[in-house]
Image (cartoon, rainbow, N blue to C red):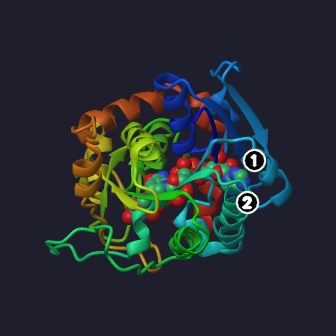
Amino acid sequence: MSNILVTGGAGFIGSNFVHYLIRETHYNVTVLDKLTYAGNRASLSDLAEDRFSFVEGDIADAVLVNRLVRDADAVVHYAAESHNDNSLNDPRPFVDTNILGTYALIEAARRHDVRFHHISTDEVYGDLELDDPDRFTETTPYNPSSPYSSTKAGSDLLVRAWVRSFGLRATISNCSNNYGPYQHVEKFIPRQITNVMDGVRPRLYGEGLNVRDWIHADDHSSAVLTILERGRLGETYLIGADGEQNNKAVIESILEIMGEPADAYDHVVDRPGHDLRYAIDSTKLRTELGWFPQYSDFRAGLEATVQWYRDNEPWWRPQKAAAEAKYQLTGQ
Ligand code: NAD
Ligand code: DAU
């Protein structure tokens, strides 16, 4: 394996993985990315072009995808419409990219017998009660809640069917909520950090008791590389770092880190169908492949993330007004 095609490599987690590959391996990397509102070429601008190339295009473009997949030894598929709130306002791009785009990629991968790794989310499993002692495992039944998570579930099922029916050499990973640098300002943590920087009070949906299982994007990248290189074909691996926090606690931490009173935020209208709690049991990945997360201190990771947004305003500023304008439409 020497040439890796990374779809969605200009997004938050995809760009982290591209940097990780260039830093930690000898692979050549080609990124295919449509540069939607969520893609940012600047997230890759520091990479030399000796082992890295960038193709602007749509994963649903079967002709383009066929050529790029044919020339690759492996595909790692991150490209997606990724934001739940957008999916509630306009689901169509989620069906087009997450389902039809994934279909185009796996058809090309089976045609050329190329190793495929599909990036997915814990949201395909629906949500848990706050006091449920169980966490999601690889055998938890699918029960997605939103247009976003249902299209991700659909894409997972396509990959599973291509493995069974056509022998596609594929693995799937389902990861929990990522945080870290280069995350779009529409998402919870960067939105609140940049709001505080702008002198705007952070916005908490509903009571804020919803729990997310936070993992640093660097840990997600190391897990994906582990699965790509050593995962068993046809298997699904859950990726998580035991980072459960409710949203209220996260907002209070951000405010404290940024030197503001911990209660200087507003409750706003809740997300329709808002999943209550996600929690990952990543025992299979840890015991079978020996992977462990490096970031065990969420508060320290959050402090570093706050500092990154303070230091990199030119990266996020161009997206901020448009992201907030979308939220104004729903009163959030
Ligand atoms: P993101 O929105 O930051 O990035 C998505 C990238 O995909 C962007 O660069 C965008 O331009 C590109 N893209 C969108 N549609 C495309 C298309 N049709 N063709 C080519 N490129 C296209 O998303 P993210 O948060 O980095 O998530 C990446 C992947 O990881 C997604 O598959 C998501 O479901 C999954 N995931 C995300 C999280 C998380 O916490 N963010 C957790 C688990 C899984
Ligand atoms: O669990 C993995 C998923 O995590 C990924 O599949 C998604 O791509 C990713 O976007 C993320 O989904 P969430 O919906 O959990 O993330 P988001 O950042 O949108 O919201 C996190 C929590 O914070 C959620 O409970 C909603 C809440 N929230 C969000 C925003 C933007 C607020 O309270 N206020 C806000 O302003």
Of pointers 2 and 1, the one earlier in the residue sequence: 1
The residue shown at (17%, 75%) is 132
The residue shown at (56%, 43%) is 14
Relative to 163, is 308 on the left or the right?
left
SS for dot 1: helix
SS for dot 2: helix
Locate residue 211, reporting x and y percent. Answer: 28, 63
Choose between 234 and 46: the one closer to the eye. Answer: 234
- Label 1 Cα neighbours within 10 Å, binned few <14 / some 14-19 / many ≥20: some
Q: Is residue 20 above or below residue 93?
A: above
Locate residue 29, reporting x and y percent. Answer: 64, 33
Relative to 100, is 156 on the left or the right?
left
- Label 2 Cα neighbours within 10 Å, binned few <14 / some 14-19 / many ≥20: some
Distance from the alpha carbon under mark 2 to that under mark 1: 8 Å
Can residue 104 be seen here? The reply is: yes
Q: Do the numbered discs 2 and 1 sit on residues whose CB atoms are within 8 Å?
A: yes
The residue shown at (64%, 47%) is 8
User: For the residue marked with disc 1, what is the amino acid?
Assistant: Arg
Quadrant of the frame with the N terminus: top right
The residue shown at (77%, 54%) is 58
Q: Is residue 179 above or below residue 143?
A: above
Q: Which mark is residue 70?
A: 1
Quadrant of the rendered image containing residue 108: bottom right
Relative to 24, is 5 on the left or the right?
right
What residue sits right under mark 2 in the picture?
111
Report the label total.
Answer: 2
Choose between 31 and 80: the one closer to the eye. Answer: 31
Q: Is mark 1 within 8 Å of ligand 1?
A: no
User: For the residue marked with disc 2, what is the amino acid?
Assistant: Arg
